[in-house]
Amino acid sequence: MSAVAPAVLRTAEAMRWAAPELTVALAEHAARAAAAAGDDETARCAWGWALDGRIALGEGCSAVVRAVDAVGGPARLGDTPAGARLRLGVAAVARMVGEVAVARELLTQILELTAEPSQLRADALVEVARCTASDPHAPQAQLAERMSAAGKAYVAVGQEAELIGGAVLLGISAEADRLRGRLGHGLVFARAGLDRVRSGLSAPSVAADLSLALVEALLAAGKADAAAQAGDEASAGHTEAGAVAALGWLRLLLVRHQRASGAADQDAALKSLELVVRSLGGRELPELEAACHTTIRELHEQRGDFGAALAASRAAHAAATQHRAAVEAVRLMLARIPRAETASATTATVATAGPHHRAEPNGGPTHSVGEAPDAPVAAEVADATDATDSAHALASVVASDRAGAANWADAPDGARPTQAATLPSEGLMASAVVVHAGFSSGPAAPETVDELLVRMGAKVCGALPTGGRLHPLGDGAVAVVLAGYGADAARQWSDSLRTNLTEHWSELAGDLPAAEFRLALGHQVAGQSVEALIGNLRASLPDREQRTRRVAPVV
């Protein structure tokens, strides 16, 4: 057994709140030392703490597969207390990517191993509460019960864990109440959590998370000035590595809100987001990077700087591709966990979200209508992952639509549809994108419109994220339903699709004069059916005479 590894690991554990980046470095060092000494159990525990630190830094999705592979893969996660910290990290990341059932199964195993009060048991109960809080439809009594259990577990541990753990729980309560429309409660909990961590505790990642929760709650309550002030205070008060991810999402949230309200200073907004992007250097936060570059692109387009907009678009696409690859790697790893460990688990795919990706059911629908720049744009090389059968899949959709058999296509991985897909009417909130193929010169023959729609199929179907559903609407239009996707994730995917179609328009429609596409994005609100959301989006696409900008063939 290594004499060094346990001592280093104890130091890593002690730094988890104050400096998670040091927890990562020390835990990885301890893991390598233990592995070299043949101490597999200590190595497994150390990799668990390394993953814990990565999650605090916002990098859990990118790091979890490496940690699991380091102990020999999913089959070697083990069922001993030494491996429980690593399984807890895997459960947390599973929740982040929408595999909540897998997360709950892993958490059940951990709680069975840790009947006595401990930091591990308290952390596991917090993750159980997070799983419940992430479901806007979970009964309030159930959430309260699980929050109470986690709080009591932290009290049993005592000292720093009780104080900081209590602040973490207040942040979870703030987020849960905001998602459920209890805005007053959300504000109270976020402020109470911040007051706790500001009372002398050193927990920058927790403080930044609470600042983000407070800004979200203030914006949801219509208090934009107070939100901006809270954001400035948070940015000035935290420069630690543990605060980078949450503060990046916070700055992005404020810029987007200011743009939506027409109050944004473009120069200040660009400076703010470019500062965020620079702060991500060397960090594994591709989702945040993609979201920032997407908004930077929009700001450059608004200024008429299409060269800079294209560069930002490409950077956003590269980061989004990296994030999607990381999420898919996580899901593949989760699927390889032995069935005995997840016997009752079923995958529940929702947003491909990082720890700061938030659903926004309280916001009204927003629309993005064919916003490609008027100037010609240089085309990028097509993704090698585009499925060759996608056009055939959409051709089948077009044929079924003509026959009156709509809403049956389901091609989440770009393959030919194989099963019926009905519009979800219950469960998680949804976002939707409506894509319409047409001609600026006026109505065209149905066969010509269908030909254009089929050609676009390789891009639309090939770009479908996991869980995305394709639905023909007739009249040259299709809808993509993203069940459980929050506004940011849906907008990011919509922007990526629009960029992909625009940059490959010459190959899709170069021989079809005046061909164009229109795109609208919207988010379901409380009490609204998915059918109504899609209907509103379809109706929101302006008539040809009303459009001042349109997507033309790229030359």
Image (cartoon, helix red, strand yellow):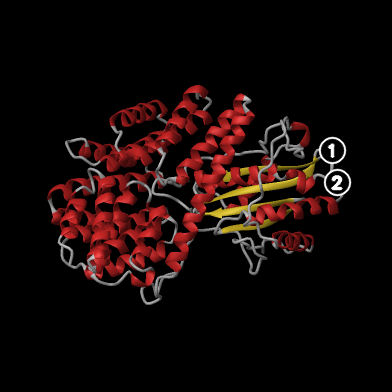
Is there any visible trace of residue 463 in the rendered image? yes
Q: Nearer the viewer, residue 492 or 305?
A: 305
User: Which residue bears the numbered disc 1?
Assistant: 441
Asked if the residues shown at circle 2 and circle 1 are in contact, with their CB atoms under 8 angstroms apart, the answer is: yes
Residue 249 or residue 332, whichever sits in front? 332
Q: Residues within 10 Å of mark 1 (few under 14, many from 20)?
A: few
Near-viewer residue (51 or 97): 51
Q: Amino acid at mark 2?
A: Ala
> Which quarter of the image is occupied by the N terminus?
bottom left
Q: Secondary structure at mark 2?
A: loop
- Quarter of the picture containing the C terminus is top right
Q: Dot 2, how many residues are within 10 Å of its Cα: few (below 14), some (14-19), or many (20+)?
A: few
Horizontal and vertical percent position of residue 329: 47, 60
Left or right of residue 295: residue 192? left
Marks 2 and 1, how far apart in space?
8 Å
- The residue most toward the front is 36
**Rendered residue at 53%/31% (across/down):** 260
In the rendering, at what x and y percent does residue 208 appear?
A: 31, 39
| Residue 366 at x, y percent in the picture | 57, 39
Instruction: Give the residue at mark 2.
Output: 444
- Residue at image position (44%, 56%) is 97
List x then y, in percent, for residue 516. Answer: 76, 42
Q: Classify 318 as above or below 120.
A: above
* Viewer-side residue, 395 vs 152: 395
Amino acid, disc 1: Ser
Residue at image position (25%, 62%) is 45
